[in-house]
Image (cartoon, helix red, strand yellow):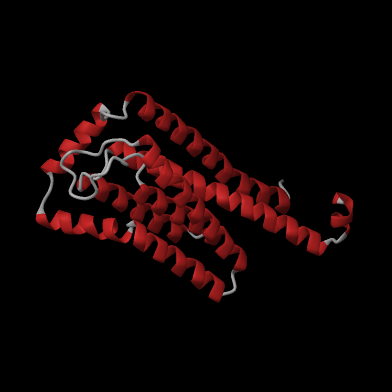
Amino acid sequence: MKSPDERDDLSRLKPVIVGAAAIIVAVVLLWIVTSVRRDQPFPVDVRWHELMIASRTDAGLVVAWIPSHIGGPAIAIVTSVVVVGTLLILRWWWAAITVAAALALCIAIAAPLARLVARIRPEDSLAEVVPTSFPSGHVAFAACLVTVLALLFRHWLWWVFGAVWVVWMAWSRTYLAAHWLSDVVGGLFLGVAVGILAWAVVETIRRRRAARTADPTLEDRSA
């Protein structure tokens, strides 16, 4: 029978494994896109794009624009400030540090990466038209935010809400032809990987500080 500490270590190890897998998938997809698919979509991208265009309705466009606007760069920054500020007001210091680190890292990676890859968007995009299609920053930010919040608060409702929000965001970006399907998939894995990485690093620091506070001799041993 596992001790409480062993179960706790296992619960922290599982997200790290998922994060490592997400990093691998994101890197492989990035390599494929930059190597052979920078100027042309995958066949599955084309089929999905055609399906989205064929299914467009006025009501669908309204529904699609909601997450697209909310997940825009300016509002994403506002969202970051509001979430972190709320956590600080509640004096959940470590949670605030974790969320701030995750979102800052996500923004710092996704935006420059999209400019570096410079993948062409669909010609009939109803949103952005600049060649910064891969990865989807909207989806990366959404996935990063919900991942880190779900890991912090560990309630199934966070996972359900997060899954719905990310799927809605990914669908909206392809429905508006702002991205290819592979762009939003890349954004998803990037966001999940960054969220887990930030959580794992900050959680490790927090636990070590807590252990040193509980047992001051640990600090003497590490000196």
Seen at 63% across and 50% down, the residue is: 201
Residue 179 relative to residue 80: left or right = left
Q: Residue at x 31, y 27 (%)?
A: 37
**Which picture quadrant has residue 202?**
bottom right
Q: How many labels sit on residues?
A: 0
Of residues 87 and 165, the one nearer the viewer is: 87
Q: Of all residues shown, which one is farthest toward the top?
A: 36
Q: Is residue 51 above or below residue 166?
A: above
Q: Identify which residue is drawn at 24% across, 27% down.
A: 43
Where residue 175 sits: x, y (%)?
A: 20, 47
Residue at 85%, 56% in the rendered image = 219
Seen as rendered, the residue at the extreme bottom is 89
| Residue 163 spot, x, y in % from top left | 38, 52
Q: Is residue 39 above or below residue 105?
A: above
Q: In which quadrant of the rendered view does residue 213 lie?
A: bottom right
* 216 in relation to 195, above or below: below
* Relative to 207, 28 lies left or right: left
- Seen in the image, is 194 located left or right of residue 136? right
Q: Position of residue 215 (x, y in %)?
A: 84, 61
Residue 136, given in percent of the width and then of the height, sits at: 34, 45
Left or right position of 202 against 209: left
Where residue 117 sits, quadrant-wise, is: top left
